[in-house]
Structure formats: C-alpha cells, structure tokens
Image: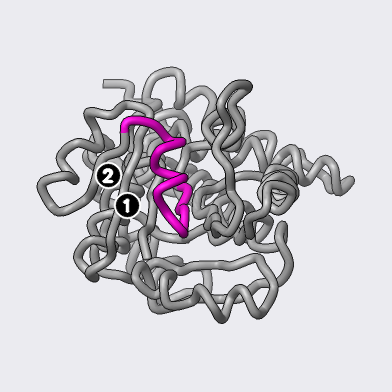
Amino acid sequence: MKIALLGTGLMGYPMAEQLIATGHDVIVWNRTREKALPLSDTGAQVAVSAKDAIEAAEIIILMFSDGKAISDTLFPVLNAPKFGGKTVLQMGTISPDESKLLHSQIVKSGGEYLEAPVLGSVPQVRERRLIVMVGSTLAQFQQHEPIFRIFGSDIYWIGEVGHAATLKLVLNHLIAAETAAFSLSLGMVRSAGVDVDMFMSVLRRSALYAPTFDKKLDNYLTRDFDSANFPVQWLLKDVGLVLQEAANMKLDTRAVSAIYEILNDSNKKSAKKDYSALYNIIHPDTK
C-alpha cells in the first residue's frame, strides 16, 4: 500500500518521516519542491506534481496550511487528478464547511474522505503523541485507525465529517484565549513589580492553572519567540475561522474578535514567530 503525503511543511515533514520509519511506501509532494527533497534520503519518493503523487497512491494524507491550498491542489481547473478507489485523510486545520465540501467532491470523484485534524506540534509528531480527532463513518474510522496510530496514541472518533473540524477549531481558540489571558496577567505582574515566581507558585496551586503557562513562560520572560512550533500566522488563520463559525452560529463574538485583533497586530511584526509572540502586543517592551 502506497501512501502519499501532500504538504511537507512544519508538520507534514516529520509526519512523512514517521510513515517512512514505520515501513510504509511513501511518496511526497510539496508546493515548494526543495522542502520535500531531503525526504528522498530517508526513503520517500518525491513527486514532480501533486497529480503524480495522488495517482500513485491508495491513501492520500493532506497536511496543508489552509482550505484554499487544498482546493487549488486537488481540484485545479485543468488536468485534475482522479480519486476513484482512493482514500483521502485531511489532517490539517480547515473550517467545517471546507471539510464538508471536500468530502462531497472526493466522494463524487469516486473516493472516500475522512477528516482527521491533530492537536500537537512537531515534538508530539516525533514522539508519536499527537491527539487525532476523526470525522467519518465508524467503519471508516475503524479501518484507518492503524494509520492514525503512526502519529499518536490518543485517537478519537468524533462523529460525522465536520464535527472533528469544529472540535479542532474550538481547541485552537482555547490556545489563543489562554495565551492572551495569561499574557495580560503576566504583564500586570511584571509591571507592578510582583515577584513572577510567587505569581506562578500561587497559580500552579489553583484551578486556574494550565500547563501551557509554564511551557511558554521562558518565551515571555526573555521575549524570545523565534523557535516556532505553531507560528502566529497560522493561529491567526484558525482564530479567523473560529470567528466566522461562531458568527454563523449566532454566538457573541466580541471576546474572540478582540483576540483576533491582537493576533492580527502580532502577525504584522511576527508572522513566522511562535504564537506566544502575541505577548509583545499585550505587554510591549518599553526598553
């Protein structure tokens, strides 16, 4: 069984490495081909075109940055690939409506489609600890679960297509909301001259604590956001999708709108830096 992985960026590259390491026959493709070429040294075939990769494989894993990149790749105006008898596993972060449209297009083309967005980043890929959320039929989930276990041990069947995409968005919203809230709290502590260690000691003993606060604490204190496992630009994109979905559901979006504006400001200066760089917007460095 040959597996194609399309999109060898921040997450796709180590995911391809895991597929190869577990003995699978892998073909990869990336819009910037040079980024995929080193995978040939580890046993992957690097396709010249997405169409070549798709038509050579039985299972196609998508790890693109957004829905438009997927649509442009899978359904070009000319010379579109065929999906008859193939399975598409969409593992990036896109909106529920985008996922449902992909499902309809793939099925119409004779293939099957599962959405399987993941929670975690590069370290979790390398340790096979991603959380995988699957939207599909139960039978499809059971059939393809072994592939998802290449990337993680916590694999959840969420329900029909669209449900896993929704769950991924709300979890990414929490990343942004918790980061923004903690940034303001830490900024107030530091501005008032309160001891940061004391603040963290009290916080850790409370029900308010989240592990991400310690995970990113050094980033905030040193204002070093260069090592990005999840860049500002992609969290901004995801929060934009949350804003869109919440508005469609007639929910009050004032809180998420404020976070979106903060991320948008951060994106102007720090698009490729770690998402925790939004701290610099909330607590500017006045030195």
Nearest the viewer among 77 and 218 is 77
* Residue 74 counted in the magenta span: no
Horizontal and vertical percent for residue 131? 45, 69
- Residue 196 in view: no
Q: How packed is label 2: few (under 14 Cα within 10 Å), some, or many (20 or more)?
A: some
Quadrant of the drawing holding the C terminus: top left
Q: Which residues are magenta?
A: 48-62
Residue 195: x %, y % from top left:
29, 54
Say what amino acid the circle numbered 2 marks. Asn
Residue at (71%, 61%) from the top-left corner? 161
Q: Crowdedness of circle 1 by 10 Å Cα count: few (<14), some, many (20+)?
A: some
Q: CA distance from mark 2 to mark 1?
A: 5 Å
Instruction: Name the quarter where the N terminus is drawn.
Output: bottom left
Say which element carries label 1.
loop
Secondary structure under badge 2? Answer: helix
Q: Camera-side residue: 112 or 248?
A: 112
Q: Would you say 213 lies left or right of 137 here?
A: left
What residue is disc 2 on? 219
The answer to whether residue 117 is seen in the rendering is yes
- Horizontal and vertical percent position of residue 265: 51, 22
Residue positioned 71% across, 39% down in the render: 243
Image coordinates of residue 103 in percent, x first then y, are 69, 52
Left-right relation of 139 to 33: right
Q: Residue furthest left?
A: 41
The residue at 53%/57% (across/down) is 89
Residue identified by numbered label 1:
216
Circle 2/circle 1 CB separation < 8 Å: yes
